[in-house]
Amino acid sequence: MSVALLWVVSPNSQLSNCFGFVDSVREENRLFYSSRFLYQHQTRTAVFNSRPKQFNNNNNKQKRNSYPLDTDLRHPCSSGIDLPEISCMVASTAGEVAMSSEEMVYNVVLKQAALVNKQPSGVTRDLDVNPDIALPGTLSLLSEAYDRCGEVCAEYAKTFYLGTLLMTPERRRAIWAIYVWCRRTDELVDGPNASHITPTALERWESRLEDLFRGRPFDMLDAGLSDTVTKFPVDIQPFRDMIEGMRMDLRKSRYKNFDELYLYCYYVAGTVGLMSVPVMGIAPDSQATTESVYNAALALGIANQLTNILRDVGEDAQRGRVYLPQDELAQAGLSDDDIFAGEVTNKWRNFMKNQIKRARMFFDMAENGVTELSEASRWPVWASLLLYRQILDEIEANDYNNFTKRAYVSKAKKIAALPIAYAKSLLRPSRIYTSKA
């Protein structure tokens, strides 16, 4: 299941090798401790100044054929469809405390909002950052790292990239860095090498994330995000949660109810909103609480991921996956067998109408918060919201056949949406804001 990253992307089957994590596995024991690029200037210069082969798609394909992947990858180191509220209770991993997925996620939202309130955007955080990052000459290296992130964003998220050009340079580069990390993470379990990825590999990726937040990035693309988290009040928890969503994809192919699905959607997409708000910033004249803006960003991630799920029912079924609440399927008189059969019936149409209704409700919740973002950050978010929402319209236009027809927004409709998104981005924040927490 592709992650809905809040941004409109153009998936590419060679993207994961483009980022080099899988192909770096064999070299990591040699490089990880002795020559991490921010520890040694010579190594750092070599890493930044050489154009890695993994950015060449042809080279990627050749490398993938030449070097089989080691599967070990060792590292030392509301069920109710009409309402956003979720009533089902789930147990914690320790089994001691039970709470709904919504409550679990809301606790994360509160933490992120408190962090922003405590430390305004743009103020460097007191992190254990490697001193080398401040040495003369590293600014140009970081600039190249950010440029690389921008190139990747421009290639795989064209519409969103255009919108970021209206943002301030610092915010723009930071968003590119976050985007790239999210794409790399998603491709670990949804890319061409996904069948080889193990829980151990994700543990390594999380360990690498922790190093990144300590100011010790492993490669050029990591460096952009490592610098970003020193400049903005970005917390590591949403990043860890996204990795947890990847783990969920490795072990889980069914969801009993919407409570379970909501948690998955938060892990793989809602987290992106929490990562992005500190960078995009809240408008100075906004009367909204920080918490309510985070809730809106979370809602947009949930809406996008639900839209992905509804669009990709047929494709996911081919992989033996059903990302639809099992209890709601049963209530509609449907089962997994009906999905695998791929027949559009009246039962299916009625079921899909309710699923689309819920996704649109989350989009409505998200709209309340976009206007509260800083003015220069609104256009790419509005463009993402409007274009992703149109996918639901296309599913309806296909008579709810998401088994054999892929709903997509035409290029003409995308172009037509951009000026609408821009006009919406000019709206001033509301003076009276009601939180939908």
Image (cartoon, helix red, strand yellow):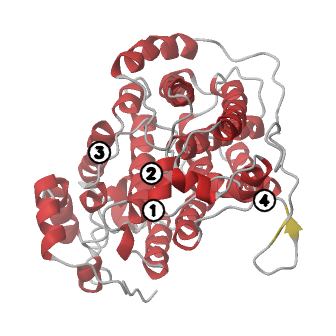
Task: Name the secondary structure under disc 1.
Answer: loop
Q: CA distance from mark 3 to mark 1?
A: 28 Å
Residue 315: assigned label? 2
Task: Name the secondary structure under disc 3.
Answer: helix
Q: CA distance from mark 2 to mark 1?
A: 7 Å
Q: CA distance from mark 4 to mark 3?
A: 33 Å
For the residue pair 53 and 285, the one nearer the viewer reads as: 53
Categorize mark 2 by other alpha carbons within 10 Å: few (<14), some (14-19), many (20+).
some
Query: Residue 272: percent from the left, percent from the top?
Result: 56, 47
Quadrant location of the C terminus in the rendered image = top right
**Mark 2 vs 3, N-terminal side:** 3
Categorize mark 4 by other alpha carbons within 10 Å: few (<14), some (14-19), many (20+).
some
Categorize mark 1 by other alpha carbons within 10 Å: few (<14), some (14-19), many (20+).
few
* Mark 3 and mark 1 residues within 8 Å of each other at the beta carbon: no
Q: Residue at x 78, y 59 (%)?
A: 104
Which residue carries the number 3 mark?
Answer: 152
For the residue pair 180 and 245, the one nearer the viewer reads as: 245
**Mark 2 vs 4, N-terminal side:** 4
Left or right of 200 in this view: 350: right
